[in-house]
Amino acid sequence: MSAVNGSLGAAHLAQQLGPWRGADGTARGKSLQTALAERITALVLDGRIAVGVRLPAERALSDAAAVSRTTVTAAYALLRESGFAVSRQGSGTYTALPDRTAAGLTGGWHDSVRGDHVIDLMCAAPMAPLPEVQAALRCAAEQLPAQTGIADFMPYGLDALREAIADRYCARGLPTSPDQILVTAGAQSAITLVGRLLLRPGDRVLVEGPSYPNALDTFRAVQARLVPVPLDGDGWVPGSFEDALGQLRPRLAYAIPHFQNPTGHLMDPDREASLARAARRAGSWLLADETVTDVALDVPAPAPFATAIRAVDSESVLVCGSMSKSFWGGLRIGWLRGPARIVHELAAARAALDLGSPLLDQLVAVAVLRGDEAHLERQRDRWREQRAMLMRTVDELFPAWTYRVPEGGLSLWVRMDREEATGLAHRAQTHGVLLHSGPRFGADAGTFERYIRLPYALPPETLVTAMHRIALARAVPGPWQAAEHRADLVA
Ligand SMILES: Cc1ncc(COP(=O)(O)O)c(C=O)c1O
């Protein structure tokens, strides 16, 4: 049983639920209790409600969410039945996670999935180290004894790695010195540091709508106010970000210019320059996330963000990057590139976070970055093959779903024919597939209910299995629908 993690206020939960009902108060063909239970489950699965948190008292939630107490009671019962909540005698109902081994996997499918039954489509990064990483690991292990003079923590990162990262920027056309580089534990840690150093509660942060969920959570965690700038089918609407910067003068703007996560859009260099200038005029920091830049499948890998602007215009531009997409998600090395002054302040601020990145991983990263990049082309071939297989399977199984073929990145951002992302993500889980629903990518609760993100980072045959399971999850009633069906029969 999970630990107790505090309790959740009724008003807060009602706000987190977002628009889970239609304007007419109904839940689009479902019972209200099912819709409410599905929404709470999605919040737990997405990590927006922690496990082990006490849910509000039924009467309080019924008032805050404007539903009857019977509906809340029935929804809590459904959560308990599916394993997403547990009751404790005299103390209330707490969020929980079901035991995955008992999660009702559908017979047959799981045999092909590396014995662990569950296919993780939440992660969009290479799941196994490439042979190049393994070779670099051997090389790093050999070098380790020679590193004994090095202090056990290095807030700026290993000099040799800062140099290798700076040299890579130079080779890609952006002059960079090692003192402009801070090595971090993945790009996520760079985003966290930026959030902690630059943001105060109430600061505005401009983000794309949709955007990378963990970055959104990072900004929420420091109580920033997220202001989404919607992307359309072609990506960044001309002038939209620049206008929002000029009008709102946010403290920070966060963008993913290359193969945007989750949409896959690619920003052109003129637009990058215009964005960087607009941020400078507004007095805002701009954090460009280049984590996915190397995953260029149909176009050459883009030049570093805003390469075309003058040095003075780039003073407010911070860029983060990572080894995790190009090499291996388990290699927890990323970086931040920015003015040396900011790198210095971030290095000082990180003491409260992690003191430094693991030395062995840093040595591996040096060896990988100093090696030749032929492996990246081979890796891109694999990704193209996986993308083609995923698209073929989606087209075959879900002809009404639409998506734009991304020129790069690791996922399809799929628009479904109905608003069912939250429920589908839940039902997919009971069929052994972990999936991020569209709302996870929205700054505002409850948006993107018609979308799901389907990564193609796994082998083709696993992707096919996953899509068949999702099709089954859509067709076969999950435990809740079955419960409702039984209730109908009784009535
Ligand atoms: C846009 C974006 N930024 C940052 C990250 C986190 O990267 P890392 O694994 O290097 O922490 C990811 C990972 O999926 C991502 O897609």
Image (tube, rainbow, N blue to C red):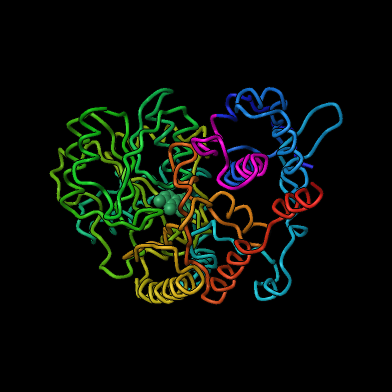
Q: Residue at x 14, y 46 (%)?
A: 309
Task: Tell me what residue is drawn at x 23 percent, y 60 percent.
Answer: 172
Picture layout, residue 295 above or below residue 28: below
**Which residue is farthest right?**
89
| 126 in the magenta segment | no
Q: 195 or 93: nearer the eye? A: 93
**How far across and how far down the image is residue 418, in percent?**
48, 54
In percent of width and height, residue 225 lies at 40, 28
Magenta segment includes 17: yes
Q: Residue 109: in sight, yes or no?
A: yes
Q: Is residue 110 left or right of residue 200?
A: right
Q: Nearer the viewer, residue 231 or 351?
A: 231
Q: Which residues are magenta?
A: 15-39
User: Which of 421/260 is in front?
Assistant: 421
Vertical placement of residue 473 versus 334, above or below: below
Q: Is 3 on the left or on the right of 286, as rendered? A: right
